[in-house]
Amino acid sequence: MLEARNVSVHFGGVRALEEVSLELCGTEILGLIGPNGAGKTTLVNVLSGFQRPSQGSTCLEGKEITAQSPRQFARFGIGRTFQTGRLFKQLSVLENIAASAIGMGLGLKAARKGAGILLERLNLMDFTSIKAETLPFGLQRRVGIARALALKPRYLLLDEPAAGLNEEECDDLMKAISSLPGDFGCAILLIDHNMQVVMETCERIHVIDGGRSLAIGTPEEIKANESVIAAYFGSGKV
């Protein structure tokens, strides 16, 4: 289990998170949603070691790891993607994926072999030698997921992977994400503003608003939650 325990993050007078607790277990797909500015990315930063909480802790299998570096979080089996992609633009798709594995200590031959497997699994074989900067946005998102998977994570944190994708690309993304726990044995935390992607992909959903937890439940429970409707969905139900 990967946990945030009563996590608060304060930036001066701004309270980005206030006593938020979250659990990511087994091979589940957990959605994390909320209005803009709710604190979703800040929470992912805490869970991946990129942000130290002002209060509270991050725990892995019951052991506190809050003070560890992002590199150590990755070595513990916590991988993530970023909203902006952060690909090595001048490197090929294969080289981008292999670079993640090399960063974890694999040799070049083993890293390239592992990258080839991920290219096939994520339907990227046609783009192996293409420079990352020339890829359309949807494919860049997919390469970002492949790079995170090259770390062999037990927990994969996806920060808005469907942002900017068209309907067809979203359908492909949902199929890819849904297959990851079974194929790679990892749990997934999914942040996205595309409610179709979240509702159709996730088993549980955790809603935060104003830096605080608002609701946790199945997609059907979240759709029917009056507080969630008021805070996130507006006046009408999903």
Image: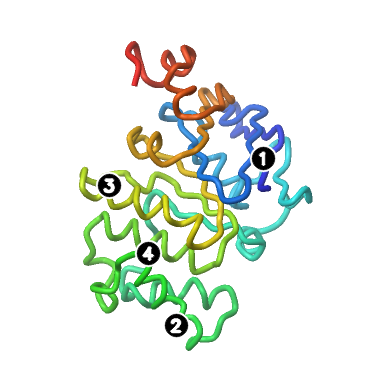
Determine contact: label 3, label 1, CB under 8 Å.
no
Relative to 90, residue 18 above or below:
above
* Alpha carbons under labels 1 and 4: distance apart: 28 Å
Which class describes the residues within 10 Å of circle 1: few (<14), some (14-19), or many (20+)? many
Q: Position of residue 9 (x, y in %)?
A: 63, 35
Residue at the disc numbered 2: 113
Q: Earlier in the sequence, mark 2 or mark 4?
A: 4
Which class describes the residues within 10 Å of circle 2: few (<14), some (14-19), or many (20+)? few
Q: Position of residue 94 (x, y in %)?
A: 36, 76
Tell me which amino acid carries mark 1.
Ala
Query: Which mark is nearer the camera, 4 or 3?
Result: 3
Residue at the disc numbered 1: 4
Query: Which mark is nearer the camera, 2 or 4?
Result: 2
Tell me which amino acid carries mark 4.
Leu
Tell me which amino acid carries mark 2.
Lys
Which class describes the residues within 10 Å of circle 4: few (<14), some (14-19), or many (20+)? many
Tell me which amino acid carries mark 3.
Asp
Determine contact: label 1, label 4, CB under 8 Å.
no
Query: Which mark is nearer the camera, 1 or 4?
Result: 1
* Alpha carbons under labels 3 and 1: distance apart: 30 Å
Which class describes the residues within 10 Å of circle 3: few (<14), some (14-19), or many (20+)? some
Q: At 25% across and 46% down in the image, what residue appears?
A: 165
Disc 2 on helix, strand or loop?
helix
Q: Indicate left or right for 147 with 138 as reference.
A: right
Residue at the disc numbered 4: 87
In this rendered view, identify the residue nearer to me: 236 or 178.
178
Relative to 164, residue 129 above or below:
below
